[in-house]
Image (spheres, helix red, strand yellow):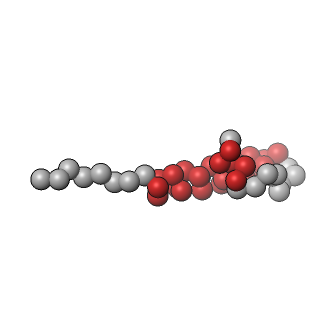
Amino acid sequence: MNCMKLLGQKLMARDFDRQTAELQVRIAILNRFTALGIPVTQPVG
């Protein structure tokens, strides 16, 4: 939840369906940032 709050404290949309879509976009952004931060390990030798 802390990471979600870093993207904004409030929802901008007023309609429930749009709020749901806004949260899905935020989660997709967080997942993308997480995927970019995970190191790729390869065996040496």
x 60%, y 56%: residue: 29
The percent coordinates of residue 12 (x first, y second) are 83, 56
In the rendered structure, the answer to whether residue 6 lies left or right of residue 14 reads left
x 54%, y 50%: residue: 31
In the rendered structure, the answer to whether residue 14 lies left or right of residue 42 reads right
Tell which of 5 and 31 is nearer to you.
5
In the rendered structure, the answer to whether residue 3 lies left or right of residue 13 reads left
> Quarter-wise, where is residue 40 in the image?
bottom left
Can residue 21 be seen here? The reply is: no
Tell which of 33 and 15 is nearer to you.
33
Can residue 43 be seen here? The reply is: yes
x 43%, y 52%: residue: 38
The percent coordinates of residue 7 (x first, y second) are 70, 56
x 53%, y 56%: residue: 33
View extreme (left): residue: 45
Q: The N terminus appears in which quarter of the rendering?
A: top right
View extreme (right): residue: 14
Tell which of 10 and 19 is nearer to you.
10
- Picture mark count: 0
View extreme (top): residue: 1
The percent coordinates of residue 24 (x first, y second) are 66, 49
